Each structure stands twice: as C-alpha cells, then as structure tokens.
Image (spheres, rainbow, N blue to C red):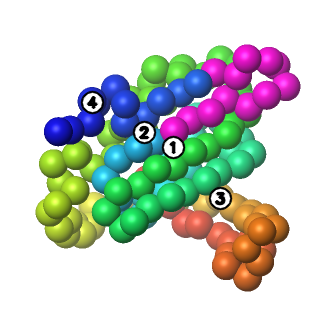
Amino acid sequence: MGILQDDVVLVRPSEKDDEPTVITVNCPDKTGLGCDLCRIILFFGLNIVRGDVTTDGKWCYIVFWVTGNSSTRWGLLKQRLMEVCPSCSSASMLSYFRPEPQSSKPPDMFLLKFCCHDRRGLLHASMFCDFLS
C-alpha cells in the first residue's frame, strides 16, 4: 500500500478573497523538511499566516495557511514542494546528509516569528532561520 504522488502536496485555493489558501503536505519526514517547505513558500512571494505540523519521526503531516501573491503559479509551487519531500519508499531507510557545494551567493535570511499561545515555552518568540540556496 502506498500514497499517490498527487496526494503528497495538496493546494486548496481560498473560497473568499479574505481567506488564506491551504497547502497540505503528507509525506515521510526528514530533518529540516519544515524549513525547506517554508523557504519555497516564501520564495514564491507568499506569506505564511498559520502553520501546523504533526510528525511521529517517520511520517509527517504539515498544513500551511498562506496569503499574498495573486499571480502565484500554484502548479509550479506544488511541484517544487513535492521535490523536497522524501519519496515514500525512503520512509523506512536512513538518509545520510550530503552537503551541497557552496555557492558564492550569500545565503538568504528570513525572520520567522512563532506565536504559540496554547503551548507557551516550546518555541522562542522569534528565531532566525538561515537558508542556503
């Protein structure tokens, strides 16, 4: 039994102008997957207004509520998000870190601010995430 490739990333457009678009990712987990997904969403000019992550260490389910760019190429965004997700067959295998060659371009930096009202103290009020391209 497996998961269909089309079900790994689902994009549900907002029904009203003032509502966010919902992006869900359902795939095997890997270290840094959440940061990779956030980076791609931010590069598409979207704002992440809310997020939810559930994982057991092997499989994850991530939901993003995003707003922003009306000219977003949703098909291309979905493709890019699927590319960073590990394949379903790798869920039972160990992945080894292979550093990518360093580029001369300085890394992009984003300020991610976490507001966690229901579980205070789990995350710092704000943190810097440094993403290498």
Disc 3: which residue:
110
Is residue 22 on the magenta stretch?
yes
Position of residue 42 measured from the top left corner of the image (x, y, whole percent): 61, 44
N-terminal of the pair, mark 1 or mark 3, is: 1
Give the mark count. 4
Q: Residues within 10 Å of mark 4 (few under 14, many from 20)?
A: few
In the rendered structure, which amino acid carries the disc numbered 3?
Answer: Phe
Residue 111 placement, left or right of 27: right
N-terminal of the pair, mark 3 or mark 2, is: 2
In the rendered structure, which amino acid carries the disc numbered 1?
Answer: Ile
Nearer the observer, disc 4 or disc 2?
4
In the displayed structure, 16 sits above or below 64; it is above
Mark 1 and mark 4: Cα distance apart in space: 22 Å
Mark 4 and mark 2: Cα distance apart in space: 15 Å
Nearer the observer, disc 4 or disc 3?
4
Nearer the observer, disc 1 or disc 4?
4
Q: Which residues are magenta?
A: 13-24
Mark 3 and mark 2: Cα distance apart in space: 18 Å
Disc 1: which residue:
40
Q: Residue at x 65, y 58 (%)?
A: 110
In the rendered structure, which amino acid carries the disc numbered 2?
Answer: Leu
Disc 4: which residue:
4
